[in-house]
Amino acid sequence: QVQLEESGGGFVQTGESLRLSCAASGGRFSRYSMAWFRQAPGKEREWVAIISRLGDSTAYSDSVEGRFTISRDNDKNTMFLQMSSLNPEDTAIYYCAASKMVLTTSTGGYEYWGQGTQVTVSS
């Protein structure tokens, strides 16, 4: 069973950047497809970006395409989300998630979740 811990969230101004990290422990990291999700107040959790086990396949939601980059370092058991050109609509709690299943954008496809890290973007 893998444990996940996010870090790197914070308070930024519109147009600024942040880099989130997700550290994994307790399992063989390279066995898991990984994803970032986010949940804004009063909204459902939505997928942001996904990455395959070896990092050779990625996908992004339309709302972040071209601004966010997902990556992973299997040697360091860590996944990243580089976020640029942030805007207030990006304000949310960001969660990392791991799945032994095929790569998916569905929350139901992920067995393991971190506790989340808050990202707040001020206008």
Image (tube, rainbow, N blue to C red):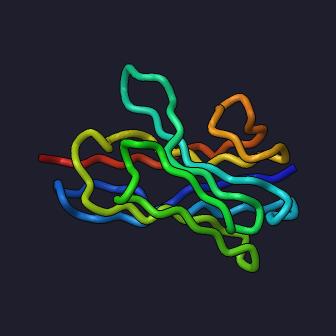
Q: Is residue 10 above or below residue 90?
A: below
Query: Which quadrant would residue 51 be assigned to in this image?
Result: bottom right
Residue that appears at 36% across and 59% down: 66
* Horizontal arrangement in the rendering, residue 61 relative to residue 109 (left or right): left
Residue that appears at 36% across and 26% down: 41
Provide residue 20's location: percent of width, then percent of height.
Answer: 47, 62
- Residue furthest top as drawn: 42
Depth check: give the residue in front, 61 or 115.
61
Q: Is residue 89 above or below residue 64?
A: above
Residue that appears at 41% across and 59% down: 68
Residue that appears at 38% across and 20% down: 42
Query: Which quadrant would residue 109 be assigned to in this image?
Result: top right
Depth check: give the residue in front, 23 or 87.
87
**Count of marks overlaid on the render:** 0
Provide residue 100's location: percent of width, then percent of height.
Answer: 84, 47
Q: Is residue 61 above or below residue 106?
A: below
* Horizontal arrangement in the rendering, residue 61 relative to residue 28 (left or right): left
Provide residue 2's location: percent of width, then percent of height.
Answer: 81, 53
Q: Is residue 25 above or below residue 74?
A: above
Provide residue 57's location: percent of width, then percent of height.
Answer: 66, 61
- Residue furthest bottom as drawn: 75
* Horizontal arrangement in the rendering, residue 87 relative to residue 37 (left or right): left
